[in-house]
Amino acid sequence: MTQDFSRKEFEFLESFAVLLRAKTIIEIGVQKGDSALYLCRAAQKNKGKYLGFDIWDTHGLKKQFNTCGSAESVADFLIKKGFRCFKLIQIDTNRNREVFEQVLDESCKDGIDFAFVDACHSYYGIFNDFFSLYPRLSTTGVVIFHDTLNTDGCREFMLDLRTKYHDGTFDLIDLPYGYGDVRCGISILSKRSFSNLQLGITEICGSISTPQKIEFRELKWNRHEKKKGILIPTIKKKDMKSINIGVYPNRKKFK
């Protein structure tokens, strides 16, 4: 039986970014530009821009992954596809976090509408990338994480976003799909934008409460959910349990 390794999640990313009317689209972890193609298409449809960040070098906690692609090859690929609405930056977003955040501040003055995080899959990597992005999201900003089902660092960070780091300003859902039969996992983090935008109810079909009461309850709930003083620790490479790094295809169920 032939296995399915199709990348339907990239089509989803494009459609979702178009739905959100995302003007500023960020990707961390570009590699050969496979997903960049779809995100550039979304940026073009939205009359926006795409910024892609990648180390384009050997990577991973123990440098266990070889270089995949280059800024030059991706730029050439996207230009040949007819795109001009992009900028590619070669950087280690973790080691050079201050520089990375400075580039974000300079390039995303109206906030980040859509971010796709698919770079270092260690907890250290995804932790630092997220906390560089989140304060810079727009009011309705969304972050999509890749490989959150099958990779330890990504999966634990999703758990901690729901628990240790949840400040009541976002919602998070997991989808056990991506990369065909591999089911790598996609997680979507969205700001709570209904009450942020204060958009009113415009259609009455019958409910338990009046529109005004629904909106009031929503605002009250949102304010109540927000937590101050959430402690965000400093995570370093030395904190990672990296002794047995590798792929374990037999771990299909909880053990």
Image (spheres, helix red, strand yellow):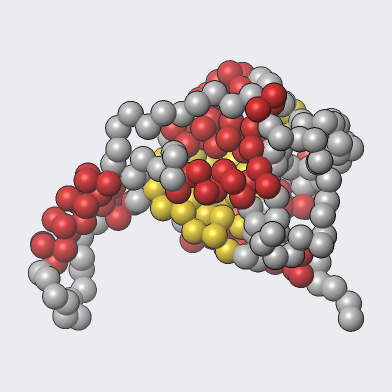
**Placement of 104 over or under 13, stated as above or below:** above
Q: Is residue 40 visible?
A: no
Residue drawn at (36%, 40%), measured in percent from left and top? 167
Q: Give x and y (percent) for residue 63.
A: 84, 31
Q: Nearer the viewer, residue 145 or 102?
A: 145
Q: Is residue 33 left or right of residue 17?
A: right
Q: Is residue 82 left or right of residue 105?
A: right
Number of numbered markers: 0
Indicate the quadrant where residue 87 lies: top right
Residue drawn at (77%, 52%), measured in percent from left and top? 34
Q: Give x and y (percent) for residue 243.
A: 80, 35
Q: Nearer the viewer, residue 45 or 219?
A: 219
Q: Give x and y (percent) for residue 191.
A: 39, 48
Indicate the quadrant where residue 126 lies: top right
Q: Is residue 35 left or right of residue 144?
A: right
Residue drawn at (52%, 49%), measured in percent from left and top? 159
Residue drawn at (14%, 66%), measured in percent from left and top? 211
Question: Hey, which residue is sitting farthest front in the picture?
Answer: 255
**Placement of 138 over or under 171, stated as above or below:** above
Q: Is residue 177 left or right of residue 81?
A: left
Q: Give x and y (percent) for residue 84.
A: 69, 42
For the C terminus, give its image quadrant: bottom right
